[in-house]
């Protein structure tokens, strides 16, 4: 494993993007895959099971998106600084740093799936080989609908905390822990990496700047999914916040697409059904075409 930081210049200022690489990039047999974490505002840590793919000769690059965890924090930036194009620019900078723009794949989890699909639709990178959209959403309205449906079974204090959102981070995090215990990660004990990533926003020293910026308010990619050119794998769990109707537009609108639901998982099948997940994702990444 190799780790470090990458200078990222944006609007005349230079920031640092923290990264971690598993596998041998210089001697790679297959194109590397870049893992895009959720949030927005979390960290790469909870995605670390994806490092298993390095054992299948697929190098894996993780990074903490700007404003998060070990990368540069920018608490004083206005809300409109935080937008999807900023994060796509950062992703392109990561690709350029490792000189892998000619052949790479993306796996995006939750918000990371938004980032991955928007990268493809907005920039049409010629080197993108495969797209994996895992436990993600095709529109904010579908995500909100799913949350509302699932929350109906919870006590009032949990529903109130979730409704408060980032206006009351402490109450929201308490409610989110209850919610995630059923629909976020059902592995017990809950992985330390999962807790750590959430603490980067909601913990005692957490930074809510990115997560409270409203980046995906009113967002949808449904009407642009026909622009996805590359083979795409869509994944969700049977007890996922990303219920079937939340991810269905990816399957309906993307031309080259496969959809798999993990029957014994919620929002993190790479923890909950780790071996099967890595087998399926690894096989997909190695496929020609």
Image: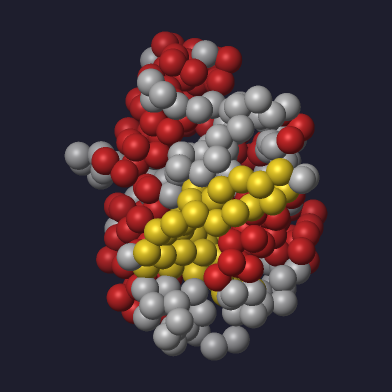
Q: Does residue 43 lie above or below 274 as drawn?
A: above
Q: Position of residue 127 (x, y in %)?
A: 66, 77
Q: Residue furthest left?
A: 189
Q: Does residue 202 lie above or below 222 as drawn?
A: above
| Residue ID at (64%, 52%) | 8
Q: Is residue 68 left or right of residue 85?
A: left
Q: Does residue 272 lie above or below 130 as drawn?
A: above
The colour scheme used to paint the residues is secondary structure
Q: Is residue 163 left or right of residue 275?
A: right
Counting every numbered tag in the picture gives 0
Q: Position of residue 152 (x, y in %)?
A: 47, 23
Q: Nearer the viewer, residue 272 or 245?
A: 272
Query: Which of the 4 image quadrants contains residue 197?
Result: top left
Q: Does residue 9 lie above or below 281 as drawn?
A: above
| Residue ID at (44%, 15%) | 170
| Residue ID at (54%, 50%) | 17
| Residue ID at (37%, 47%) | 46
Which corner quadrant holds the C terminus?
bottom right
The answer to whether residue 159 is seen in the rendering is no
The answer to whether residue 12 is seen in the rendering is yes
Q: Position of residue 65 (x, y in %)?
A: 55, 47
Which corner quadrant holds the N terminus?
bottom left
Q: Position of residue 168 (x, y in %)?
A: 52, 13
Query: Which of the 4 image quadrants contains residue 214?
Result: top right
């Amino acid at each position: 494993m190799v780790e470090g930081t990458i200078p990222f210049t944006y609007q005349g200022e230079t920031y640092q993007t923290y990264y971690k690489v598993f596998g041998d990039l210089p001697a790679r047999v297959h194109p590397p895959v870049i893992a895009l974490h959720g949030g927005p505002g979390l960290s790469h840590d909870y995605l670390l099971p994806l490092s298993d793919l390095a054992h299948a000769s697929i190098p894996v690059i993780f990074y903490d998106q700007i404003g998060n965890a070990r990368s540069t924090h920018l608490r004083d930036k206005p809300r409109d600084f935080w937008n999807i194009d900023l994060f796509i620019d950062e992703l392109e900078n990561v690709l350029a740093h490792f000189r892998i723009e000619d052949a790479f794949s993306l796996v995006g989890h939750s918000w990371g799936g938004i980032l991955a699909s928007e990268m493809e639709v907005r920039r049409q990178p010629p080197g993108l080989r495969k797209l994996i959209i895992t436990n993600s959403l095709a529109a904010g309205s579908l995500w909100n609908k799913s949350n509302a449906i699932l929350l109906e079974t919870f006590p009032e204090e949990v529903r109130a905390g979730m409704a408060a959102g980032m206006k009351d981070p402490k109450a929201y995090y308490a409610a989110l822990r209850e919610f995630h215990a059923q629909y976020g990660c059902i592995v017990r004990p809950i992985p330390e990496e999962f807790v750590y990533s959430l603490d980067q926003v909601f913990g005692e020293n957490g930074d809510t700047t990115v997560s409270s910026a409203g980046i995906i308010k009113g967002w949808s990619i449904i009407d642009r999914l026909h622009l996805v050119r590359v083979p795409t794998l869509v994944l969700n769990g049977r007890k996922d916040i990303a219920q079937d109707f939340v991810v269905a537009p990816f399957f309906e609108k993307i031309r080259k697409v496969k959809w798999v639901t993990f029957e014994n998982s919620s929002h993190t099948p790479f923890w909950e059904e780790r071996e099967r997940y890595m087998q399926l994702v690894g096989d997909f990444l190695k496929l020609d075409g």
